[in-house]
């Protein structure tokens, strides 16, 4: 690995940890308190291309460890990385449970709407059938042609006599 590239990455990581990036976009994020330390921000701060860290596993490991340690330092409720990660796992499990509950709720709602729609379609078919029976037999075909020609997608398949 090129030593100058490694030095750029390490210097960029150090600036990010201190919260003093040179990159304008990252500086704005740091001021807003939304700066995250990850491979992408280190590449950006180092002034190197996207994905340039992909061949530098040792630097990626350092970035991951420093990022985790930095998050532990900023956290008020945890003292070590394991506690932080366990807290995140609990949070994600809770979110998954809530998402599953919403999914079940909306699935039930969709099924009830499907049932209501089927009932409504059956009522509509029955009503059309009864109306057609009121029309004299010799005019029924002409009446149906008029309905179909008015709006072709307005016809529901049904069992007519």
Image: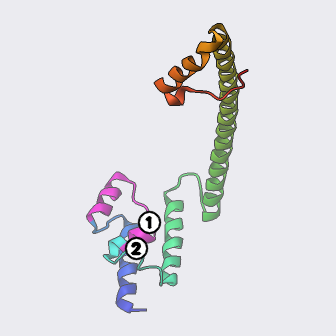
Mark 1 neighbour density, 10 Å: few (under 14) some (14–19) many (20 or more): some
Residue 13 in the magenta stretch? The answer is no
How far apart are labels 2 and 1 at the CA level? 8 Å
User: Vertical placement of 32 versus 148: above or below?
Assistant: below
Contact between labelled residues 1 and 2, with CB atoms less than 8 Å apart:
yes
x then y, percent, for residue 51: 42, 76
x then y, percent, for residue 55: 48, 84
x then y, percent, for residue 80: 61, 63
Of callouts 2 and 1, the N-terminal one: 2
Q: In terms of secondary structure, where does tag 1 sit?
A: loop
Position of 117 with respect to 12 (left or right) is right
The range drawn in magenta is 24-43
Mark 2 neighbour density, 10 Å: few (under 14) some (14–19) many (20 or more): many
Residue at image coords 63%, 16%: 128
Position of 47 with respect to 77 (left or right) is left
Q: Which residue is mark 1?
A: 37
Residue at image coords 65%, 7%: 134
Residue at image coords 62%, 60%: 85
Q: In terms of secondary structure, where does tag 2 sit?
A: helix
User: Vertical placement of 92 versus 85: above or below?
Assistant: above
Magenta portion: prevailing SS class: helix
x then y, percent, for residue 157: 65, 29
Q: Which residue is mark 2?
A: 13
Residue at image coords 39%, 59%: 35
């Amino acid at each position: 690995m090129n030593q100058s590239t490694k030095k750029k990455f390490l210097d960029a990581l150090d600036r990010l940890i201190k919260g003093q990036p040179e990159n304008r976009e990252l500086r704005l994020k740091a001021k807003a308190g939304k700066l995250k330390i990850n491979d992408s921000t280190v590449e950006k701060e180092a002034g190197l291309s996207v994905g340039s860290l992909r061949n530098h596993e040792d630097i990626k490991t350092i970035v991951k460890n420093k990022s985790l340690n930095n998050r532990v330092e900023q956290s008020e409720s945890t003292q070590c990385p394991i506690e932080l990660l366990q807290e995140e796992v609990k949070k994600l499990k809770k979110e998954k449970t809530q998402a599953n509950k919403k999914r079940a709720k909306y699935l039930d709602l969709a099924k009830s709407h499907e049932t209501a729609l089927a009932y409504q379609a059956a009522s509509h078919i029955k009503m059309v059938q009864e109306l057609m029976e009121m029309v004299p037999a010799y005019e029924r075909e002409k009446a149906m042609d008029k309905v179909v020609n008015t709006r072709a997608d307005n016809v529901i398949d049904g069992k007519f006599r």
